[in-house]
Amino acid sequence: MSDTFRGEFNQKVDAKARVSVPAVFRRALEAGDPNHPSSPRPRMVLVYGGDDRAFCEVFTILGMRRVEARIRRMKIGDRRRIYLQRNMITLSQEIEVDDDGRIVLPPKARERMGLTADAMRDGAEATFAGMLDSFQIWYRPVYDGDLASQPALAREILPEGEDMSSLLPDDDDEGG
């Protein structure tokens, strides 16, 4: 069972803001939920705070505990800690996958994504984008626009004539 989120999946969002979580992501959520399998509905933490990003970040329960531990190690009163607490703890919500493999996108998450009631009635899609230890949920047209900006980013960060693997640290530089 994998605890890594990889791949992209487009899923219909119904008029009630319900969307199916891709099965491979549900397996990773189960692996990251200490209550599973005694509780068959995997839980997750959906973060809708942060900068001007147009997506929500989703962590497993154990993954969010690791994030929380890192925040706790920061000095109380540090502005960076306060920022992280506000945006990753306060502006987040624990949700669970229902028996049909779906979640209901909370109103603040839909607002963050730019997903309107009209769009949901018209058959909107959400994109689930794997990011290793978490995944992002985007309103598909916004995600597609972000993907369109990737060639410009590549030109900015890649050394001339190199491919993306050149950005990886050396094997001996890997830090768990």
Image: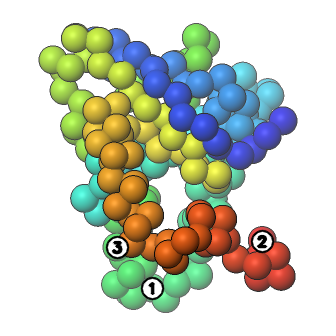
Q: 41 or 134, which lies in front?
A: 134
Tag 1: amino acid: Ile
Tag 2: amino acid: Gly
Tag 3: amino acid: Tyr
Find disc 2 in the rendering and name its residue.
176
Find residue 74 and report its horizontal and vertical position in percent: 52, 84
- Tag nearer the camera, 2 or 3: 2
**Image: 9 above or below 146:** above
Q: Is residue 110 visible?
A: no
Find residue 106 and report its horizontal and vertical position in percent: 34, 32
**Which residue does the image show at 80% across and 28% down from the upper left?**
37
Estimate the spatial distance between the alpha carbons at disc 2 and disc 1, rounded to whole Å: 26 Å
Chain-order first, disc 2 or disc 1? 1
Q: Secondary structure at mark 2?
A: loop
**Mark number for residue 20?**
none
Q: Is residue 168 visible?
A: yes
| Quadrant including the N terminus | top right
Find disc 3 in the rendering and name its residue.
83
Chain-order first, disc 1 or disc 3? 1
Q: Secondary structure at mark 3?
A: helix
Find disc 1 in the rendering and name its residue.
76
- Tag nearer the camera, 1 or 3: 3
Chain-order first, disc 2 or disc 3? 3
